[in-house]
Image (spheres, rainbow, N blue to C red):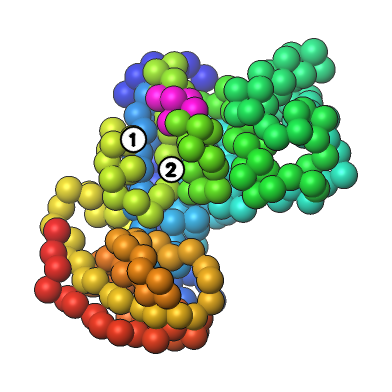
Amino acid sequence: MGRGFWVVVRELAGVVKNFGARPVLRGVDLSVAAGEVIGVLGTNGSGKSTLLRILAGVSKPSGGTASGRPRTGYVPDRFPARQRMSALSYLCHLGRISGLSTAEARRRAGGWLERFALAGGPDAPLRDLSKGNAQKVGLAQALLPEPDLLVLDEPWSGLDAGTRAVLTEVVGESAARGAAVVFTDHRPDLVRTTATRAHRLVDGRLQPLGSEVPTCRILLRGGTDEEWSGVVARRGDDVELEVAVAEREALLLEAIRRGCAVISVDSRVGR
């Protein structure tokens, strides 16, 4: 397809997604145009990954429409790297499936692995890679076909500082060549500085990030050693979070499930 700027490549209209009786997305409208970078902010369990799976075409909505069929590169929140193949062999195989010649697939794959500085080099077995290095291979496979739509779920998670900077460059370069990029993250500053248009997913609905969204701060102590979204500060066993008020009850239930003590909830904080 052509890569003219401001051409809509993917559009969601009134998209609803339910898992059983539980609604996750509630009437999402989103137009994705060539050359723009869209950031989606949200806490764990807010529906970000579900939204991206629908955008990438790997999941169908329960209601509403998802139109447009761009060539898409997709990086899920957890890249399945438990394979016997080497990183380069895996990428060459995917490249051939996408229509590249063996030589071109090998050239592109090698270039991306070098740029992302894969530990162990291109012959490193996928099953031996750390989470961060598996993420690098996941990014390479998404970029291999030079997609018109690049869909990235928490793509900076697990990467070292140098690779995070490289990925930010790649996002900008992809938009500059006319591709659309949609990514999720839980850090407001990163979303604002990287995206040309930013949204927050709250209660299954997209809201412009610049709009007034009431937030609250929650102080937790102890529990399982897992990552939280919306972290403001960590002090020993304590973690302070800032989340949308609409997401407060769901986060408190999750905190209790993880064995955390809820020290305080301050709803007076606002954006």
Residue 27, visible in the rendered structure: no
**Residue under circle 2?**
183
Residue 153 against residue 256 in the figure, above or below: above
First in sequence: mark 1 or mark 2? 2
**Whole-percent x and y of residue 156?**
49, 43
Magenta extent: 166-172
Looking at numbered disc 2 in the image, what kind of residue is underneath it?
Answer: Phe
Q: Residues within 10 Å of mark 2 (few under 14, many from 20)?
A: many
Please tell me whether residue 261 belongs to the stretch shown in magenta: no
Would residue 77 be seen by someone viewing this image from the given angle? yes
Q: Quadrant of the C terminus?
A: bottom left
Going by the image, does 110 lie left or right of 143?
right
Q: Which residue is mark 1?
A: 194
> Which amino acid type is shown beneath numbered disc 1?
Thr
Q: What SS does tag 2 mark?
A: strand
Q: CA distance from mark 1 to mark 2?
A: 10 Å
User: Residue 268, how many percent across, how many down?
Assistant: 12, 73
Q: Residue at x 48, y 69 (%)?
A: 18
Q: Nearer the viewer, residue 149 or 62?
A: 149
**Residue 59's quadrant in the figure?**
bottom right
252 lies above or below 30: below
Q: Is residue 161 toward the left or the right of residue 31 in the image?
A: right
Q: At 14% across and 68% down in the image, what residue appears?
A: 269
Tag 1–tag 2 contact (CB < 8 Å) = yes
- The mark lying in front, picked from 1 and 2, is 1
Foreground residue among 13 and 153 = 153
The image shows residue 143 at horizontal and vertical percentages of 59, 28
Task: Depth check: give the residue in front, 200 or 126.
Answer: 126
